[in-house]
Image (spheres, grey):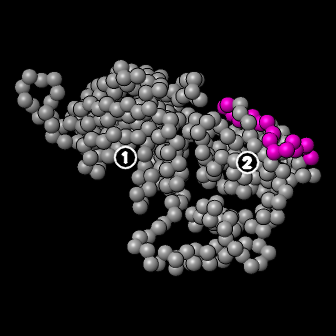
């Protein structure tokens, strides 16, 4: 038996890191060659990573939501399969690529000297790989107390500096990683329209006056209309796989940005939204947002479009960001008293500005304009979409 170190595979040029989405096997489990053992997220998609060898999973060196550099160790497997120098071919879903493996020789003693709970504690404290590798310890194993001592020494060193440094940890590190990768790939286009918001406000007032248990918000009403519009625009249910394959999903999986305390951010997702009735959608969105507020990020590879609602933050206009592999984000601004559009006489009406950012690699300007105008028409003719 030989110990084999599984590493984060290199997928495409320029990719620097990936996020571990989920671990599909437990330490001690027997695994077979080409069997999916974990999922990882890149700028391309979320994909299964298959084992390049058969054997027994000894330990995980990473946890779900960890962001790792390409070629970083992720697991150790005990295997009888021949280990050819340091590389084994493997298959990734949805794309066939290669994964890198290396026989664990001198690294084995290093791994045995660092218990999993110590590694987990180092990740929790936001230590980089370089910092972690530089921590000294007196005993046979590195313990969390050794990390505390390292951080305390660093605090003393930084005490005289005119600033405070805090590690970027947890969910914000994941968001930052997604944004950096998206900035390298997405070619953004932006446009905006002003919608007459009075029909939506009138429908909300009508529902509220009934004093029933069903009291959806204005945003929920609008989000449902958007999901029905998306059904007619397959380009906004499409992602770009690699550089040349367009993958259009059958259903509308609509994402909604959810703010968390401390300026945190996560995403709620309503799957197959276009198949739901109006009450079903409202209930699903409420449940999904609550789940997101409890800390569960729901993004997956089938989500191509998201909404960011800033009506409660007194922002009238903004340019939203598209996070790959999604192809579009819609900003909903505050409602204000503005001038009616398309009339010869000056006339005030309740207005809302809608800003769309789209990935120009997938969607061109006319297609984006048609989609945005369809959303505006849905807001202004909401009774065609929702029976109060």
Residue that extends furthest to the left in the rendered view of this protein = 345
| Disc 2 crowd, CA 10 A, few/some/many (<14, 14-19, 20+) | many
Q: What is the number of callouts on the image? A: 2
- The residue drawn where x is 42% and y is 60% is 261
Q: Left or right: where does residue 79 sit relative to residue 347?
A: right
Please provide the residue range marked out in magenta: 80-95
- Measured as percent of width and height from the top left, residue 151 is found at 58, 74
Quarter of the picture holding the C terminus: top left
Q: Left or right: where does residue 1 sit relative to residue 164?
A: right
- Measured as percent of width and height from the top left, residue 197 is found at 23, 35
Nearer the camera: disc 1 or disc 2: 2
Q: Is residue 208 or residue 227 the one in the foreground?
A: 227
Q: Left or right: where does residue 270 sit relative to residue 88?
A: left
Q: What numbered label is drawn on residue 213?
A: 1
Q: Is residue 286 or residue 8 the one in the foreground?
A: 8
- The residue drawn where x is 63% and y is 51% is 68
* Residue at numbered disc 2: 7
The residue tagged with tag 2: helix, strand or loop? strand
**Residue 232 quadrant:** top left
The residue tagged with tag 1: helix, strand or loop? loop
- Measured as percent of width and height from the top left, residue 89 is found at 79, 36
């Amino acid at each position: 038996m030989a110990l084999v170190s599984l590493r984060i595979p290199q997928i495409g040029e320029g990719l620097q890191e990936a996020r571990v989405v989920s671990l599909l096997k437990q330490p001690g489990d027997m695994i077979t060659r080409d069997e999916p053992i974990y999922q990882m997220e890149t700028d391309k998609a979320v994909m299964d990573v298959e084992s390049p060898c058969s054997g027994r999973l000894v330990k995980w060196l990473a946890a779900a939501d960890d962001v790792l550099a390409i070629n970083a160790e992720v697991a150790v497997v005990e295997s009888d399969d021949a280990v050819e120098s340091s590389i084994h071919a493997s298959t990734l879903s949805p794309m066939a690529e290669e994964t890198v493996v290396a026989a664990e020789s001198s690294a084995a003693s290093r791994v045995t000297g660092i218990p999993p709970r110590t590694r987990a504690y180092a990740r929790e404290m936001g230590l980089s790989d370089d910092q972690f590798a530089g921590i000294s310890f007196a005993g046979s194993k590195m313990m969390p107390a050794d990390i505390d001592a390292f951080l305390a020494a660093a605090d003393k060193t930084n005490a005289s500096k005119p600033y405070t440094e805090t590690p970027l940890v947890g969910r914000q590190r994941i968001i930052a990683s997604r944004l950096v990768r998206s900035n390298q790939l997405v070619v953004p286009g932006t446009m905006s329209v002003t919608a007459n918001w009075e029909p939506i406000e009138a429908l909300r007032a009508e529902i509220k006056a009934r004093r029933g248990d069903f009291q959806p918000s204005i945003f929920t009403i609008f989000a449902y209309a958007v999901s029905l519009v998306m059904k007619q625009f397959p380009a906004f249910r499409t992602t770009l796989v690699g550089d040349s394959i367009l993958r259009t999903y059958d259903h509308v999986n609509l994402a909604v940005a959810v703010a968390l305390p401390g300026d945190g951010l996560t995403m709620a997702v309503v799957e197959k939204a276009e198949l739901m009735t109006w009450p079903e959608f409202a209930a699903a969105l409420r449940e999904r947002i609550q789940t997101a507020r409890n800390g569960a990020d729901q993004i997956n590879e089938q989500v191509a479009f998201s909404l960011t609602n800033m009506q409660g933050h007194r922002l009238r206009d903004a340019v939203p960001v598209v996070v790959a592999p999604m192809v579009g984000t819609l900003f909903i601004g505050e409602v204000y008293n503005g001038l009616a559009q398309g009339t010869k006489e000056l006339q005030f009406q309740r207005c809302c500005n809608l800003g769309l950012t789209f990935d120009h690699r997938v969607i061109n300007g006319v297609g984006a304009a048609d989609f945005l105008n369809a959303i505006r028409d849905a807001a202004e003719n909401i009774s065609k979409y929702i029976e109060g």
